[in-house]
Amino acid sequence: MQHDRLRLFSFATAEKRAEYLWVLRAFDLARANYVVLLHAAEVAAILERTGSADPAAALSAQDVAPLLEQLHAWGVLERGYDGTRAASLAEYRNRHYVYQFGRAGYHAFRAVEDVLRARGEDASLSRLALADLLADLTELAAANAAGDGELIYRKLSRLDTTLSDMAERAAGFYLMLGDLVRTTEVTPESFLAHKDAVLAHMREFSTDLARYAPKLAAALARVQETGIDRMLGFAAAHDERVLLPAPERQADWRARWRGLERWFVGAGDVPSESERLREGTMSAIAAVLALLRRVTETRRGGVSRESQLRHLAGWFAAAPSEESAHALFGAVFDLGRPRHFSAVHPDPETIPVTTSWWEAAPVPIARTLAETGRTPSAGAPARVQRNESGIRRLRERQLAAQRARAEAARSLAAGGVDERELSEPETEVLLSLLDAALSARVPVSGTVPGATGTQNGVRLTLSPAAEGTVVRTARGRLHLDGLRVSVQ
């Protein structure tokens, strides 16, 4: 489907593209005069009446006929039969062909024609459209309050068209301004010839936009007070696109209205499109003034890049010898030394950095440095391979061991060490507490915090005693001479 649509533009690149273009212009001229169907002879007559000086427009009916057939083959024109033109039975049987623009073909022709006729001088900011937008919004609020559906549809259509044209004009104007700025260094006269008009135009547009913005926002609020759903329902009911279902027509108008609201009223911290356009205009004014300052200073000093290159070319032409020209080249451009390498010999004492590259031994350099002028780096670190399943299993084992140790600590604190045999987990807790207490010398207390991370845990206290302590554990009997053990 896309390939078929691209064939519509074949007339713009064909060998006889000038002839094809004039034939299509004849159809466009007839369309403007409400004539749709044309015969080859009528196309030739229209081209003759236009009186163009272009030789490609001087076509006879015999020349036009194959062009029409080819345009029909590309899909630009549609072909039909017209028996009323026959003057005899033989002519009726042969039936004359008549042609007209296809829908897609007409859009293809207009696209090519717009590109050919586009001029930078036509770009402008539609300052006068702001007053039309305000008047249409005011009338739209009154029409919605009165329930005039036909007027609502006309006003919404006009608002949509005016706003689209305004945005398109602004985009074209700033593209033209960018082209003007880019060509200033070559031809500053073109900029100086237009700078007053450009600056005045942008200042007037920015002033009017700032003056109309609050009025337009207030007008939008008045329209919203009359009921947006009611207004969009009227617009969809009077929309002439009968092949489009009513819900889709209403959804389309709702999207257009939201775009209109976003253009003049921002949402929260997001500025409106009108505010962005005004900021862009002020930035463009500042850029033009800065450019004007540079151009003026350049012209006042009489030195520009163009004059510098012209003087340099004269010096090269007047050089007495080839060696002098090479010396002048080296002094001006300083390309004899590959300064971007920034590489030195591994032993700077043997070959100092002040030694010329022509006299010093070669220095090995990395390929990245030679090709791009950038020092090679180690690059991004390798991706860390994480064994998530193994980490999860180790974590589960660690948590299970902590829970078992906490349970053993609670059991040891509750039952103590006297007159009972300690289990293996309780024995491990007791030994760890004894290790902490004995390392700090007695009498000392060692504490094992709870598994929850709080400060409540088990406290073991060692105190001197005449008799020793015997603790029965799962590993055997533990004898502590001269010490008394208490666990709480």
Image (spheres, rainbow, N blue to C red):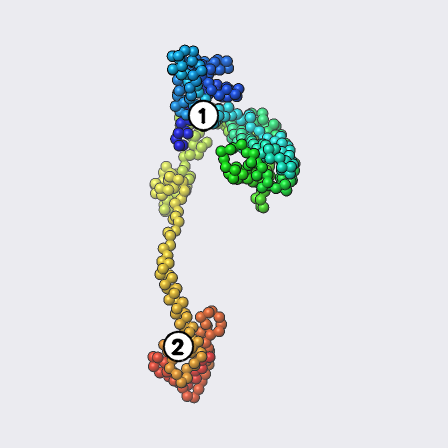
In this view, 433 is above or below 326: below
Provide residue 142's location: percent of width, then percent of height: 65, 36
> Could you tell me which secondary element the residue under label 2 belongs to?
helix
Residue at 41% from the left image edge and 70% from the top image edge: 403
Residue at 42% from the left image edge and 40% from the top image edge: 340
Measure the alpha-carbon separation of dots 2 and 1: 95 Å
Q: Quadrant of residue 226?
A: top right
Foreground: disc 2 or disc 1: 1
Mark 2 burial class by Cα count in 10 Å: few <14, some 14-19, many 20+: many
Q: Which label sits on residue 102?
A: 1
> Could you tell me which secondary element the residue under label 1 belongs to?
loop
Q: Residue furthest bottom?
A: 466
| 2 or 1: tag closer to the N-terminus | 1
Residue at 42% from the left image edge and 74% from the top image edge: 407
Relative to residue 292, is residue 77 drawn left or right?
left
Q: Nearer the viewer, residue 483 or 113?
A: 113
Residue at 57% from the left image edge and 36% from the top image edge: 235
Q: Amino acid at mark 2?
A: Glu
Provide residue 62's location: percent of width, then percent of height: 41, 13
